[in-house]
Amino acid sequence: MAEEKPLDFAGEIVDFDAGHGEAATVEMDDYSKSLAQAKAKSVKLVDAITGAVLKKKDAIHFDDMRPALADFVRQKHPGLRSDDYISRKVVDDYRGQYIAELLRDERGELSNLEDEVVESLKSHDTLAENIEEDYEEHRSLGDRVADVVATFGGSWTFIISFCLFLAVWMGINLALGEKSAFDVYPFILLNLILSTIAALQAPIIMMSQRRQESKDRLRALNDYKVNLKAELEIRHLHEKVDHLLNRQWERLTEIQQIQIEMMLEQAKAANRALKMSKAQKTKTNALKNLFSTTPKTHDSDE
């Protein structure tokens, strides 16, 4: 006669063979995974805002967005649910609108520079520029000559060469004497040349300095744009990291709760199995005692 398997309190047959139980669990896990993968492949991801069909790489789960950005999008579309999907392009557009509104609240009306920074954040473009190359492309021939003259006039090469020129000029005229010299003492021609050079050199240096100021202004504007974008990107990263930490903490707490429940269920199952095993042993011992006492009673009756 086949041995009956004990029943648990729910009326189901409990198999106390650990090997069969683990194999069944593995088979059920594999089946569940394959079923989930099949469902994931068959389900189409649709943009909850535009209604367009999305690829998996272009879809962003609404619950994975930063809370501040998610609240901003929900203000525009109150019907969004936490399990909806949105395309990356739409998220980038709303991120740009959110940053523009954030800057407008902090700084007032946005300038053209700040609008450019917002557009670069939306399109993920780089704002850093090489000011030297841009400055070189827009310089005219006169600008180049002025820069060369200003550079040479402010160097030790100019000072030393000019001192040598003066010494040679005065030495030659002094050596030739008053009758043969082309510029006798007190060197009136030399003074005229020096005055002309000084009169021409001063405005040339001022023009070069003015262009240097404009180049410094371009560099400062570029630094401002880069710093503003870096500040916004850092703020965005801080919010994203905080959001990820909160999500991971919630998931870890949920996993810990599930593990505790599984341990409690296993402990209850082990207690039930132990009680039923004891009951089975008690029943077996009772039957053994019954069969062992029956022949003695029969012999005493004879």
Image (cartoon, rainbow, N blue to C red):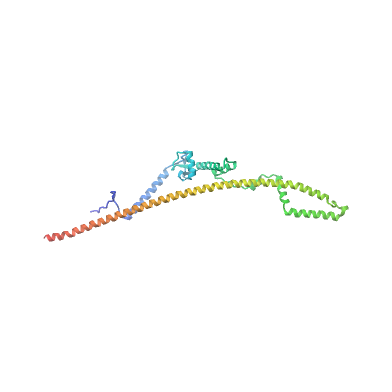
- Image-based side of 101 in relation to 296, left or right: right
Return the residue nearer the eye: 15 or 197. Answer: 197
- Image-based side of 87 in relation to 213, left or right: left
- Image-based side of 93 in relation to 282, left or right: right
The residue lying furthest to the left in this view is 302
**What residue is drawn where x is 13% and y is 59%?**
298
**What residue is drawn where x is 76% and y is 54%?**
161
The residue lying furthest to the right in this view is 179
Locate the C terminus and report the quarter of the image it occupies: bottom left
Locate the N terminus and report the quarter of the image it occupies: bottom left
In the depicted structure, whether residue 111 falls above or below residue 183: above
Q: Quick check: can you spot residue 242? A: yes
Q: Quick check: can you spot residue 145? A: no
Residue 196 percent coordinates (x, y): 78, 47
Residue 205 percent coordinates (x, y): 72, 47
Residue 14 percent coordinates (x, y): 29, 52
Residue 102 percent coordinates (x, y): 53, 43
